[in-house]
């Protein structure tokens, strides 16, 4: 059975963070106040609650109140930690539930935006329009399609970052609520290599994340995230009595090659490379990407996808290979990232917002000769 095509100015394929963020920013553009916008999202693809860790050095483009904010960063310096002050940045903790609620309040108040519960099966771009075919044979046409869905065949990532986030409560005062522990490898057991982040909510309550990075196609060895969390709290923090209030699980593909825009069919979010290849952080990067797309569409009528600097791809490639072939050296390299003592500079570097002169000084304090091994480039 065929259905007549419905026409829109903008179709957003995928209603996760990238899709919702784009709809939010489109709503805030006066030049697009009359645009007909459709969000297509499969209600069967549930978006579970996720704790989101992010940093910023200015006003966040969302009216979002984080659950916790930190101005001191504890970093792994080998056998002990170093506590570094954040002068410009703020490290924050929020939840995907709060972010989606913030976005949906604006989206649902806009009568020009509608939602459709469906699955996109194909997107075909033409010179002046885009056809979006749905799995139930319906057809939608638009001037532009912004797509954050994965292709039916999926995307192969060289690495997979997987982890668990435990919200724990201890029997005694154990945490300093002013200090966030960032990428701590002091787990006592590195097989497979894993690291922790600790974001205290109070002296007795914290969000504890355990993460590991493995080759995407590798056999997954037996590994208990729960046991790793328990061992870390006991050996590193001296916490023997605690209860787990909630548990989140998830995975993020790392090193996905960005898919180029095809005319009026523009990729967004993870398929467009918005997730940082070597860290898995993507929240503020997705916000910047979708805000830029909305702004350029409103001002020129043609969306301009932000293009990542080839320089940072050059930095990321050997480090990804190091995680794949020699994770112990990757640990050493990551620890060395903070030897400069300037945490703000490191966060700018991870955000791909540094100049070449700044990078030269930062990389000069790191074991960059590791990155020159031929196997890291082949």
Image: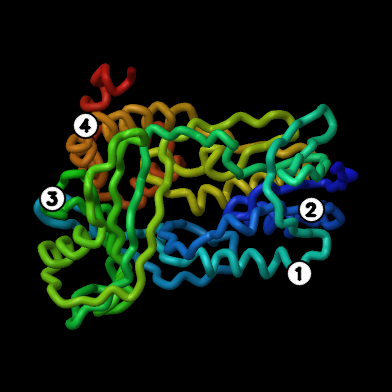
How busy is the neighbourhood of tag 1: few (under 14 within 10 Å), some, or many (20 plus)?
Answer: few
C-alpha gap between disc 2 and disc 1? 13 Å
Task: Tell whether 84 sits left or right of 133.
Answer: left
Q: Where does residue 323 sit, x and y in percent of width and height? A: 28, 35
Element class at badge 1: loop
Q: Can you identify the residue that label 4 sits on? A: 326
Is residue 194 among the parts visible in the rendering? yes
Tag 1 or tag 2, which sits nearer the N-term? 2
Q: Residue at x 44, y 45 (%)?
A: 351
Quarter occupied by the N terminus: top right
C-alpha gap between disc 4 and disc 3? 16 Å
Pick the front one: 301 or 111? 111
Q: Are marks 4 and 1 in contact (CB under 8 Å)?
A: no
Residue 99, quarter of picture: bottom right
Q: Can you identify the residue that label 1 sits on? A: 109
C-alpha gap between disc 3 and disc 1? 51 Å
Is residue 84 among the parts visible in the rendering? no
Q: Residue at x 42, y 46 (%)?
A: 252
Tag 3 or tag 4, which sits nearer the N-term? 3
The nearer-to-camera label among 3 and 1 is 3
Tag 2 or tag 4, which sits nearer the N-term? 2
Numbered badge on residue 37: 2
Pick the front one: 103 or 300? 103
Numbered badge on residue 189: 3
Name above or below for residue 105 compared with residue 194: below
Tag 1 or tag 3, which sits nearer the N-term? 1
Numbered badge on residue 308: none
Q: Residue at x 28, y 32 (%)?
A: 324
């Amino acid at each position: 059975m065929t259905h007549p095509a419905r026409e829109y100015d903008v179709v957003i394929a995928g209603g996760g963070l990238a899709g919702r963020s784009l709809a939010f920013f489109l709503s805030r553009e006066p030049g697009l106040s009359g645009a007909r916008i459709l969000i297509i999202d499969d209600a069967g693809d549930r978006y579970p609650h996720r704790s989101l860790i992010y940093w910023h050095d200015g006003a966040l483009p969302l009216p979002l109140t984080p659950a916790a904010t930190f101005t001191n960063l504890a970093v792994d310096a080998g056998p002990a930690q170093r506590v570094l002050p954040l002068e410009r940045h703020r490290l924050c903790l929020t939840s995907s539930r709060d972010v989606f609620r913030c976005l949906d309040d604006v989206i649902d108040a806009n009568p020009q935006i509608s939602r459709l519960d469906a699955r996109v099966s194909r997107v075909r771009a033409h010179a002046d329009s885009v056809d979006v075919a749905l799995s139930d044979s319906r057809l939608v046409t638009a001037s532009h399609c912004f797509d954050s869905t994965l292709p039916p065949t999926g995307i192969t990532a060289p690495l997979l970052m997987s982890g668990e986030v435990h919200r724990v409560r201890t029997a005694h005062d154990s945490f300093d609520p002013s200090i966030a522990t960032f990428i701590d490898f002091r787990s006592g057991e590195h097989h497979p290599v894993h690291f922790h982040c600790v974001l205290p909510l109070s002296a007795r309550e914290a969000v504890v994340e355990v993460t590991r990075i493995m080759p995407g196609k590798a056999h997954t060895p037996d590994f208990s995230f729960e046991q790793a969390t328990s061992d870390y709290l006991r050996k590193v923090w001296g916490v023997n009595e605690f209860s787990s209030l909630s548990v989140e699980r998830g995975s993020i593909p790392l090193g996905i090659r960005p898919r180029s825009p095809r005319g009026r069919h523009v990729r967004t979010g993870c398929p467009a490379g918005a997730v940082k290849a070597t860290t898995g952080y993507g929240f503020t990067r997705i916000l910047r990407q979708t805000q830029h797309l909305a702004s350029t569409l409103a001002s020129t009528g043609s969306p301009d996808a932000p293009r990542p600097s080839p320089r940072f791809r050059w930095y990321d490639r050997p480090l990804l290979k190091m995680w794949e072939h020699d994770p112990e050296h990757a640990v050493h390299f990551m620890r060395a990232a903070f030897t400069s003592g300037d945490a703000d500079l490191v966060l700018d570097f991870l955000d791909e917002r540094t100049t070449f002169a700044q990078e030269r000084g930062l990389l000069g304090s790191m074991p960059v000769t590791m990155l020159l091994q031929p196997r890291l480039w082949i």
